[in-house]
Image (cartoon, rainbow, N blue to C red):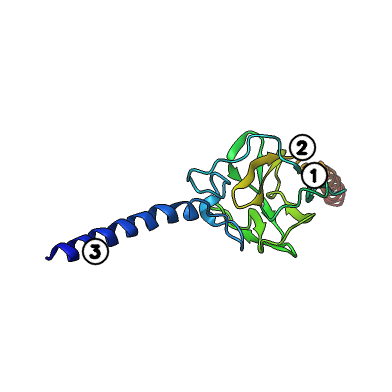
């Protein structure tokens, strides 16, 4: 290899390494414009373990949860505190207050988002489907059958690709399982004694008549 060829090879390799270093940060944040991936189910973070950290301040967004009159469903509203804090992405799940690891219940298909399946359950998370600025997102959630306990909703809000708040919490919602007690059953009266008395009296009368005729 000639001296010029060797220098050209070294220069090319150095430029390639530099391009790789510069390209590295581009892949650090995996906040996808079409919604959170299922790999984010555990941490609820769009960074997927890379170096960009979530904001430590209180989120400028709120998740309100209102149960219906029958206490069988919850309407969620995700919104900013003011008009200056539009968000582009979100990921929301429901948890029993005593178990923060397993998302419970099911979401209905939102008009401006999509559903996810985290863990062994299905449709237990909801996320955005496009990166457009959002001022409000409304979702409907249903608890597991016969569920009794307190539920808290945790939401990750994404303002920009590197600006996000993870697991912002709502107020808790209490559910009471429907009662399964049944009305007491009134036992039927036993008619056997009265029948026995009637049969005995009939037999005695017949026996008396027979004795009278024999005499």
Mark 2 secondary-structure assignment: loop
The label shown at residue 120 is none
Q: How far apart are labels 2 and 3 at the CA level?
A: 64 Å
Q: Position of residue 6 (x, y in %)?
A: 18, 62
Indicate the quadrant containing the N terminus: top left, top right, bottom left or bottom right: bottom left
Mark 3 secondary-structure assignment: helix
Q: Position of residue 82 (x, y in %)?
A: 83, 46
**Mark 3, residue position:** 8
Camera-nearest residue between 37 and 190: 37
**Mark 1, residue position:** 64
Query: In the image, is residue 87 above or below residue 173?
Result: below
Residue density around tag 2, few if under 14, some if 14–19, many if 20 or more, within 10 Å:
some
Q: Residue, x 33% and y 58% (percent of image)? A: 15
Whether tag 2 and tag 1 are in contact, CB under 8 A, the answer is yes
Q: How far apart are labels 2 and 1 at the CA level?
A: 7 Å
Q: Earlier in the sequence, mark 2 or mark 1?
A: 1
Residue density around tag 3, few if under 14, some if 14–19, many if 20 or more, within 10 Å:
few
Whether tag 2 and tag 3 are in contact, CB under 8 A, the answer is no
State left or right for residue 80 relative to residue 23. Answer: right
Q: Earlier in the sequence, mark 2 or mark 3?
A: 3
The label shown at residue 171 is 2
Q: Residue, x 58% and y 46% (percent of image)? A: 44
């Amino acid at each position: 290899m000639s001296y010029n060829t060797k220098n050209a090879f070294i220069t090319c390799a150095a430029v390639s390494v530099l391009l790789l270093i510069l390209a590295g940060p581009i892949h650090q944040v995996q906040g996808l414009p079409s919604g959170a991936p299922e790999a984010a189910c555990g941490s609820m973070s769009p960074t997927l373990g890379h170096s960009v950290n979530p904001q430590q301040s209180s989120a400028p967004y709120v998740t309100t949860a209102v149960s219906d009159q029958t206490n069988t469903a919850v309407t969620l509203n995700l919104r900013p505190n003011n008009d200056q804090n539009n968000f582009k992405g979100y990921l929301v799940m429901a948890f029993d207050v005593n178990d923060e690891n397993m998302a419970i219940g099911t979401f209905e298909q939102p008009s401006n988002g999509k559903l996810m399946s985290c863990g062994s359950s299905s449709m237990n998370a909801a996320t955005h489907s496009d990166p457009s600025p959002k001022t409000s997102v409304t979702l409907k959630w249903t608890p597991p059958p016969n569920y009794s306990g307190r539920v808290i909703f945790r939401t990750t809000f994404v303002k920009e690709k590197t600006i996000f708040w993870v697991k912002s919490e709502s107020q808790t919602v209490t559910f009471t399982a429907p009662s399964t007690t049944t009305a007491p059953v009134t036992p039927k009266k036993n008619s056997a004694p009265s029948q026995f008395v009637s049969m005995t009296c009939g037999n005695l009368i017949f026996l008396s008549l027979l004795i009278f005729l024999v005499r």
